[in-house]
Image (cartoon, rainbow, N blue to C red):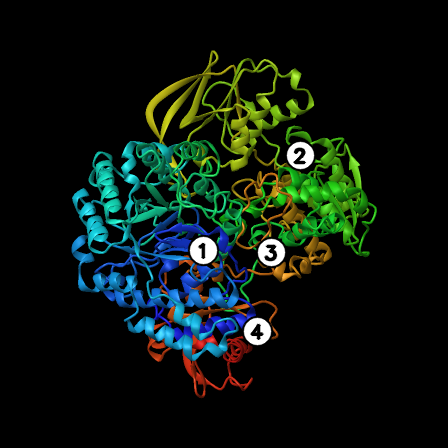
Amino acid sequence: MSDIMRPMSFDHLMTWILDEYESQQTIFGQRRLARTEPAAARPIFGEKIETPFGPAAGPNTQLAQNIIASYVTGARFFELKTVQKMDGAELSACVNKPCILASDEGYNCEWSTELTVPQAFGEYVKAWVACKLLAREFGFGDPDGFVFNMSVGYDLEGIKTPKVDSFINGMKDASATPEFKEAIAWAHANVDRFRHVDAAFVDSITPHISDSITESTLHGCPPAEIERIATHLICEKGLNTYIKCNPTLLGYEYARKTLDSLGFGYIAFDSHHFDEDLQWADAVPMMERLQRLAAERGVEFGVKLTNTFPVDVTRGELPSEEMYMSGRALYPLSLTLAKRIAEQFDGKIRISYSGGATANNIFGLVDAGIWPVTMATNELKPGGYARFVQVAEVLSHQGDAGKPFAGVDAAKVSALVDAALTGRDYRKPIKPEPDRHVLGELPLTDCFVAPCREDCPIRQDIPGYVQAVGEGRYADALNIILERNALPFTTGTICPHTCGNSCMRNYYEEHVHIRDLKLKAAEKAFDDVLGTLSARGHVADRKVAIIGGGPAGLSAASFLSRAGVDVTVFERTNSLGGVVRHVIPGFRISDEAIDHDVELCSAYGAKFELGREVASAGELLAQGYTDVVVAVGAWAPGRPALKSGKALDALEFLEAFKSDPASLKLGTDVVVVGGGNTAMDVARAAKRVPGVKNVRLAYRRTSRYMPADEEELTMALADGVEFLELLAPDTLENGVLTCDVMELGEPDASGRRRPVATGQTREVPATAVIAAVGERVDGGVYAASGCELDEKGLPVVDATLQTSVPHVFAVGDCRRGPATVVKAIADAQVVARAIANASFDAQEESNIAAEVAKVFSQRGNLCADCASTDKTRCLSCAAVCETCVEVCPNRANVAVRVPGMRQAQIVHVDGMCNECGNCAVFCPYSQGRPYKDKLTLFWSREDFDDSTNEGWLPTKDGALVRLGGTVATYDVEDAACGLPEDVRKIIVTVRDKYAYLQG
């Protein structure tokens, strides 16, 4: 059954490792294997660690394969998952699943091992011996260059129970245990399978697995109990001891204020844990006593910073009432506590750190004397254990590698705290983050997808042109772009780039700068590509008129003329470009960029008549045009913004600003009404009008709920626009705008909290008010043409965007209301397909990266400076996804290369999964649950029968398969056995080439 983990025997574990490495050159799916430098080893606990980091007690240290995956990627300090008196089935029954959510800051609702304590002991022993063997066999480092650190909880009574006490004793000396004897016996019996391991080395493997421990206690544990546990561990067990401290030591006010200031105000918690947990006044003298006691007993003492932070489940994050926060949001809190302790103890108390550490901040932590550093949220994200490779690389440049602990530098820690509180790395965006998934169910096979393309209205071949730009092939990149996008300069400058919403790079640091790369290709290759563009044929029976020369009209002209259609565009003004040309301010996009797009759209032979206003489609049909495309935009004024007093219309203001800013007389205090992108343009433009001193933007909700894009909000704030939240403008009189004060109520249909009037008012100085509350469509052309309109005054269209009048089509803002340029281009594609059977698939294959090894070499690497890097950072999802493989801590999702199938297929190994749900968090599909949806390999009939997953159990006769609700045995050798061919191939491939998966 999927939520019950079945520990592998040592024979199965080692056979898997050795066979996988021999056939794939990987170990538990890890392609990037780290080899550490023994000379850099740091002494700790009388042992040594070649790198001062590793996985924290949690999902990544629960099973032997998790620890091994960490080791081969560079980790050398392992904080083993906590054991306690409650274990196995009893504990599993208390853990709701899924139990992990790490899409940004981390949350979990599980705590100690779900195995029994003896099973956990067995996993740690197997991992210990395996890592020793692998170190020698593959040259990963000194076989004695890593340390296992126990973690126990949660009260003294439980720690003294026979099973936990035996666990501790066994970890101190496993020589007499069956688990250690079995592993050593296997190694002796299989020495001939190794090249660099001999019997003498096997005999040298020490049974002394750990002599250090981290004490973990539940929130609310009394100070005396914490000290009694530590005293027991130091005195009775002779262990080097860390006590794990909670961030609640900082006090409720500091924690609340800090998280609010960094944009994490939605994280809900009250003061009760702060009141009930260990207090600073008790903690300091306790640490002093334990420090002295440890020194007397000849062991080391330190603190572990920090435990996870208990918060409330308020948005359905996990199936629990309370969950534990970690990762990015915890970093400023844990670091602040480290600063206070370092200052209090003059840097003389050792700090083991865990709380939001990554490759981008670990150098500073270690440089300040804070080590070892353990991580959990970091490697639960895409890249997974491969993230450790970069961490090891970063620390290889550390100046004091190889030196013992010399104290914590409080000044350096203080500087790190300041950077965390003032920088952007630990700050949430203003607006809620968009959904990172693409709509749909996860396919059983062939599930690879480029999410950026799915979130692009025109499904641009983004991976293709991003790769081309990264390789300096700018002409290729621009040709790839032009296949689906007629306006690369415009969309390369002002597109809202929703493609970035689902970019998998968001889970690393930030999305690939897709829009910037598009503009780079356009600017670099425009001169080279323009002269090569020509029509791809000739459509003899079509002659198309387009009314309007804005983005939609230009795009339709480009696509239709490229397909070989005779096209004429009728534009009422004397220049092409529509709202982009006449309304969007020049500080947003230059006339030169617009001119370049017009040239590209003209290159295929379209004709343009400027200064020509067309009243109806009928007059053009009468002139012999076979089809008319209406693309007149949305220029009608928005709804009234005030009950009394006059407000300027946003479009009229922006047109005047673009043509002659000096002609505007707005006075000193301008108020903009609205919260969309147009409102931001208006506000930023108003800041540039001579005589204006203050520009305020009044909105009835908070900025978090403004419809404007995040970057538009950020740019407006950077320009000095003042946001007046929760104000609904009412009347304007004598230079004073009176507003109703609002408060947020329950969510409305849009998901945003509804503004509710409080009955209070506020007066705001306003020498001018500009309304930006929704432009509307002028229906004159439609009415004159006889087109049916809906209740919003928009044309009723079919799937091809044809109106109720045959051969009359509608595209862009005049069809849907004010929208984006890229949506206008999408409409143009639809109409070009309908009229000329145009295709936009010529560059489809460019999305598939040929060098898969190069793709994998980028996985797991964070970028420290995304703004200035010359790398694209693209993860090439269209070529390789395998995200569920990367993020599974237990290695239960395996990529299998199947002959005849272009990309690796995902096989889920049931016995290794506890349904933590982490793979579902990061699966690109909105309904994707790889641990439930992918073809599953079972190790026993019992587990097969207890599951509903589609999958198979190997049998003597072939395979027992559940598929589509039917269970039957199939002879998978027979291609006509009745199984879908892709499923049959996967089963055969696992049997023949991945037999180690079967146990």
User: x, y (%) of residue 351?
Assistant: 35, 43
User: Image height check: is 742 above or below 973?
Assistant: above
Marks 4 and 3, Cα distance to the nearest angstrom? Answer: 20 Å
Q: Which residue is mark 4?
A: 898
Label 4: few (<14), some (14–19) or many (≥20) C-alpha neighbours in 10 Å: some
Q: Which mark is residue 580?
A: 2
Q: Secondary structure at mark 2?
A: helix
Which residue type does callout 4 highlight? Val
Marks 2 and 3, Cα distance to the nearest angstrom? Answer: 32 Å
Label 1: few (<14), some (14–19) or many (≥20) C-alpha neighbours in 10 Å: many
Q: Are marks 2 and 3 in contact (CB under 8 Å)?
A: no
Q: Residue furthest top?
A: 734
Q: Which residue is mark 3?
A: 876
Which residue type does callout 3 highlight? Ser
* Residue at the (49%, 16%) spot, across then down: 766
Q: Nearer the viewer, mark 1 or mark 2?
A: 1
- Give the camera-side residue of 714 and 634: 714
Using residue 157 as the reference point, say whether residue 447 is left or right of it. Answer: right
Which residue type does callout 2 highlight? Val
Q: Nearer the viewer, mark 3 or mark 1?
A: 1
User: x, y (%) of residue 501?
Assistant: 53, 47
Q: Which image quadrant: the C terminus? A: bottom left
Using residue 313 as the reference point, say whether residue 31 is left or right of it. Answer: right
Q: Secondary structure at mark 3?
A: loop
Marks 1 and 2, Cα distance to the nearest angstrom? Answer: 53 Å
